[in-house]
Amino acid sequence: MKIIAVIPCLNEEHFIKDVVVKTINYVDKVIVIDDGSKDATARVAQEAGAEVVSHPRSQGAGAATRTGFETALKHGADIVVTIDGDGQHNPEEIPRLLAPILKGQADLVIGSRFLDPATNMPAYRKLGIDTITWLYNWGAPVRVSDSQSGFRAHSRKLLEAVRITRKDFSFSIEVLVKSRRLGLVIAEVPVSCLYHASGSTMDPLSHGLRVAWSVFLHRFTKK
């Protein structure tokens, strides 16, 4: 099976080399989607061994991931692993995500940061993720512990059936909801996570509200 890693990133020149170099040991190909970075992310990623697809301007994490999926399918991917470009995920845990799909037990595998309590996640961030995950799980027959993890493995069946339309980070909920409605099997495995002081610069409140609104739209409206 052909396994491709997709790394959507924006202004990650300080971390992307290490992520690419480590990830390439566990997959057949690494594709970096440079979402309109203003720094040297694209050049550094290419020099590290990744194929780079660049957006001329930033379109959002969802749009970057969609581009990654489409590019990976053109390369004949059977499984796509998504991993963040800021170094918070450990590429050595990729085989853990792949196992359920390789065994035919899942179509989507989420690397959950909450199945293993050892994490340095800021309390405010965990509260926001817990709230969004609760909204997603409410009344649902299939529940998850980490709806916002970007460290995931996707089967070809999912890649061909689920199209991302959300451009921002709410795409993570969109993929979950659409997968569940299609009857695709969702599984979780424990992963570690390392947060850097120079990590995300997003306003957590506005970001959380946007994603929570997306949960409502996907869960409680037909469109």
Image (cartoon, rainbow, N blue to C red):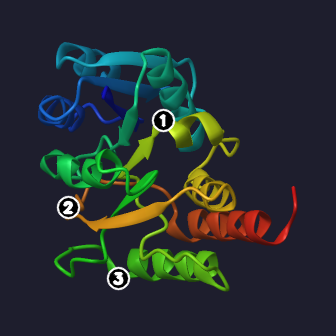
Bin the neighbour count of mark 3 within 10 Å (Cα to Cα): few under 14, some 14-19, many 20 and up.
Answer: few
Find disc 3 in the rendering and name its residue. Answer: 123
Q: What is the quadrant of residue 120 in the picture?
A: bottom left
- Would you place residue 10 above or below residue 144 in this image? above
Quadrant in which the N terminus is drawn: top left
Q: Which amino acid does label 2 sit on?
A: Leu
Find disc 1 in the rendering and name its residue. Answer: 156
Quadrant in which the C terminus is drawn: bottom right
Q: Distance between the residues labelled 3 and 2?
A: 14 Å
Q: Distance between the residues labelled 3 and 1?
A: 35 Å
> Percent x, y for residue 27?
22, 31
Closer mark to the observer between disc 3 and disc 1: 1
Q: Are marks 3 and 1 in contact (CB under 8 Å)?
A: no
Q: Which amino acid does label 3 sit on?
A: Ala
- Would you place residue 106 above or below residue 42 in this image? below
Find disc 2 in the rendering and name its residue. Answer: 194
- Would you place residue 64 above or below residue 199 in this image? above
At 16% from the left and 35% from the top, the residue drawn is 26
> Percent x, y for residue 182?
67, 55
Label 3 vs 2, first from the N-terminus: 3
